[in-house]
Image (spheres, helix red, strand yellow):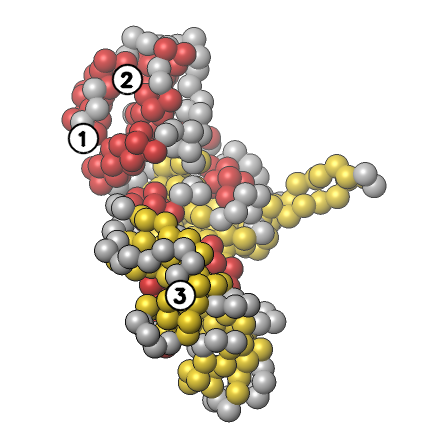
Amino acid sequence: MTAVTLQHIYKTFAQDTASGQRGVAAINDLSLKIASGEVLAVLGPSGCGKSTLLRIIAGLTQPDRGEVFYDQDDLRDIPPEQRGVGMVFQDGALIPHWIAERNIGFFLFLRHREDELPERITRISQITGFGLETLLERRPGQLSGGERQRVAVARALARDPRVFLFDEPFSNLDARLRAHARVELKRLLREFPVTSVYVTHDQVEAVALAHRVAVMRAGRIEQIDTYQALYYNPINLFVATFIGTPTINLFEGSVEDHRWQGMHFGGFPIRTDLPEHDKVILGVRPEGILLTGDEGVPASVLSVMPYFPERFNLIEVDGGGEQWHITAPLETVVTPGETVHCALDPEAALYFDARTGQRIG
């Protein structure tokens, strides 16, 4: 297995504009260490540099500055054929006029090791529970989207990869196929513990597959940790609002006599060194706001959306000038237009500087 280290990576691309070309920073002073055998998920909005990061790790894109190491070896000093990179793209990137068997075994055929292919295909099929053997004589155009991606994953594994890179491989699959493919890939990554980087928009995939999650914005990693740590201890407003479904509730307020005070909720102790009347945003996850019977802040129910697999209702309410979301058990019966009363759990409150967005401890 291989550890991957990135040190102070910069990458800028030229972009055409009405006034001429200008440089756009895709990666901006990014440093990262991926442990040997670790699966790292990379989340972030479109255009934040996720795919560029993946291509730099693979050696397909050269950074303007900075170094990439596989263990102690500079990637630039490793010949491409010896890097051992297995990549899976959104569309599988299979060679269209080759049957699946030749696509899977291309690396082995090049090295005259094709006799190893049947055993590898059998092993992958055993691990995933998917009959890969039934697809071997078909060309990519004869395969479904899910089958193409399974062939692409098998092709990447067939080459003894040191590093496994995924660029949103299941984004074109429907929800049912995504769930199956995710389970199959989890089994493969457990059986073949290859250092892996998984770029995705899907937080469920990140939780299911990765040991750690990196949240990117504008070419930088904002925070990297377990998903649970990102959810409960975000370092800034961007991470707090990006991580979590349903999204976090935000309330504007200020410091009043060493306590946070907002429009509806308030009186919560806050750091005593903060200036009086300083603007502070309070964030609280939907599960941190409680329905309290006849006490608490009155609010009108706007909508109720059941989440059956997660066993909760997502209730949107309006408190007159502020709106927020609450999660309540499925058995909770409320209807739009009804008035409910709410209380905020102070233990669930997260505070952020209104100017910088940074977390206030």
Mark pair 3, 2: CA separation: 71 Å
Which residue carries the number 1 mark? 127
Instruction: Kindly identify the residue that appears in the image at 36 percent across and 49 percent down.
Output: 305
351 or 38: which is nearer to us? Answer: 351
In the picture shown, does residue 293 fall above or below 123? below
Residue 174 x %, y %: 37, 30
How much space separates mark 1 and mark 2, taking CA atoms? 22 Å
| Relative horizontal placement of residue 243, taking residue 17 as reference (left or right) | left
Measured Cα–Cα span from mark 3 to mark 1: 53 Å
State the mark number for residue 113: 2
First in residue order: circle 3 vs circle 2? 2
| Screen quadrant of the C terminus | bottom left
Question: Which residue was labeled with disc 3?
Answer: 339
Eye-nearest disc, 3 or 1: 3
Q: Nearer the viewer, residue 318 or 100?
A: 318
Marks 3, 2: nearer the viewer: 3
